Amino acid sequence: MKRVVVGLSGGVDSSVAAYLLQEQGYEVIGLFMKNWHDDSVTIANECPWLEDSNDALLVAEKLGIPFQTVDLSEQYKERIVDYMFNEYEKGRTPNPDVLCNREIKFDVFMKIALSLGADYVATGHYCRKGTVEKNGKELYQLLSGVDGNKDQSYFLCQLSQEQLSKALFPIGELTKPQVREMAAKMDLVTAEKKDSQGLCFIGKVRLPEFLQQQLQPKEGLIYEVNADIDAYRAQYPQFASVKEQLAYEAKNIDYKPEMGKMVGRHQGAHYYTIGQRKGLNVGGTKEALFIIATDVATNAIYTGQGHNHPGLFRRALFIQENEVHWVREDLQLKDGETMEVMVRIRYRQPLQKATLHQFDNGMYISFEQPQSAITEGQFAAWYMGEELVGSGVIS
């Protein structure tokens, strides 16, 4: 009998995952991960992790499976929180959920599970695992979930073959309504529970407030840049090579205060991200202002009116060589090779047609349609059909 450890989060998805595994004849153990201690940043009198671990315990009791809590807050702080602040200070926007899966759930947590004699680790993610055989070797595939509305393969885009080999995703074949229905039938306390929002670890905390407690505020200026400045009208130069053209298309415009007019003040460029609209508190414009660039060196924020502002769009992006990750290592490109794929640059974005161009120093992704708000520090993930084959950090 194979033993599987389920990360019970106190939500409906992982509860049903545990139930399904039991039905499939696995020996199931429930583990709750505590990732956070600092109650000063959670929002008034809600203690989410206590409530969640309680719900997880009730589910485990209902299913009759052993249950325990593991405290991973130290590793969490080191690998996720510190990394996040580091990225924010550099003016990049990290994705803690992707990291949490790579570094915590399928690494630290997985090692604990294996030390308990587990054959697999299971989570309540909406995605599926497949296998293909190549040259007599079994390879694992990360496939999107059947529920197109809830597909979470993107959050697992940094997993390796080794991690996938030990992973199970029991609810990947189901839709959210089916999962809720099953939980209700089983009379699990989590059946009606709302989906958790906010960071994967801090429970109900608002990111800007969390950041403000850790990064010192420093007042700076907000500029508005017109849609018709010369920088957007520049003639396309002649390029000596494809690589040169891609580098040109992936490059950010270097904004200077004289390109726009001062329209307000902010509390620190590192709190803001490209494409953001809320939280600027600048009124009086015909259309909403969107952030088109932040400059942490000069602590300036550049904005443009409306979501069609040319400053929001780029045709290409670059990923440094050491940040290119292939889930399917066998499909890895060599210097000079290209591949037609579908790409998303954020969770829930519809897949976009694109081409990967691999060079010695990294990879360019060029899109058929210019993309809005390509954000440094976020992950671009590429798919072939419903299989996620690789990903990388936008640089």
Image (spheres, rainbow, N blue to C red):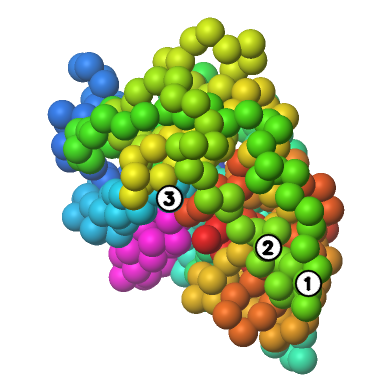
Residue neighbourhood size for the residue with mark 3, other residues' Cα within 10 Å, grouped as few (<14), some (14–19), many (≥20): many
Verify CB contact (< 8 Å) between mark 3 and mark 2.
no
The mark nearer the N terminus, 1 or 2, is 1
Horizontal placement of 335 versus 282: left or right? right
- The amino acid marked with disc number 1 is Phe
The mark nearer the N terminus, 3 or 2, is 3
The mark nearer the N terminus, 1 or 3, is 3
Task: Say whether residue 100 is magenta.
Answer: yes
State which quadrant residue 299 falls in. Answer: top left
- In 3D space, how far apart are the residues under numbered discs 3 and 2 (Cα atoms)? 20 Å
Residue to which mark 3 is pinned: 92
From the viewer's side, name the closer residue of 152 and 166. 152
Q: Residue furthest bottom?
A: 135
Residue to which mark 1 is pinned: 239
Residue to which mark 2 is pinned: 248
Looking at the rendered image, the disc whose residue lies closer to the viewer, 3 or 2, is: 2
- In 3D space, how far apart are the residues under numbered discs 1 and 3 (Cα atoms)? 29 Å
- The amino acid marked with disc number 3 is Arg
Report helix, strand or loop for mark 1. loop
Verify CB contact (< 8 Å) between mark 1 and mark 2.
yes
